[in-house]
Image (cartoon, rainbow, N blue to C red):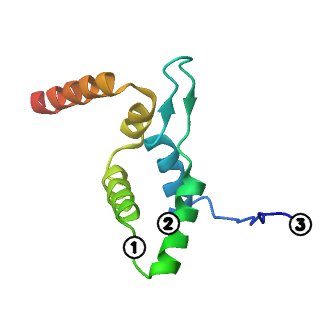
Amino acid sequence: MANTTLLPLKLQNSSKLLEFIEWYEMAYQTTNPDTGRKRKGNAKKFLTEAIEGLLSSGKVSASLAEAISEFKKASLLSPEVREAKGKLSETDFAKFVELMEKVKAGS
């Protein structure tokens, strides 16, 4: 007997849940320092644990509340800035933001 069950889930392309999953994978991406290989954040595991915790305790976990808050803040960013944040290192992204602010101040 299997220890797990597969739960296929169809989502509309415009679904907020799908948007959250894509955001989570980028926002919680990790890089192996030895190989430089990037791994997406495990959104499915995160959501499964958050929902299990919610069903068990009846309360939203701090990690879920924090992730939702970050997701809402990231939703305010343009798609280009979100993509840059996912692809650039923290240092490069900070420089990118600094340059963007300099451009806005010059307008």
Amino acid type at image mark 1: Val
Amino acid type at image mark 3: Met
Residue 1's disc number: 3
Q: Earlier in the sequence, mark 1 or mark 3?
A: 3
As drawn, 19 above or below 10: above
Looking at the image, which residue is at 11% across and 27% down?
106
The residue pinned by badge 1 equals: 60
Residue 85: tell me if it is visible: yes
Instruction: For marks 3 and 2, give the one nearer the viewer.
Output: 3
Residue 14's disc number: none
Residue 43's x, y, as percent?
A: 55, 53
- Neighbor class of circle 1 (other Cα within 10 Å; few <14, some 14-19, many 20+) is few
Instruction: For marks 1 and 3, give the one nearer the viewer.
Output: 3
As drawn, 1 above or below 55: above
Res 1 quadrant in image: bottom right
- Neighbor class of circle 3 (other Cα within 10 Å; few <14, some 14-19, many 20+) is few
As drawn, 42 above or below 31: below
- CB of mark 1 within 8 Å of CB of mark 2? yes
Looking at the image, which residue is at 55% across and 72% down?
52
Q: CA distance from mark 1 to mark 3?
A: 32 Å
Looking at the image, which residue is at 77% across and 63% down?
4
72 or 36: nearer the eye?
Answer: 36
Residue 50's disc number: 2
Compared across the picture, whether 70 is left or right of 45 comes to: left
Q: Earlier in the sequence, mark 3 or mark 2?
A: 3
Amino acid type at image mark 2: Ala
Considering every residue shown, the one lying at the far right of the view is: 1
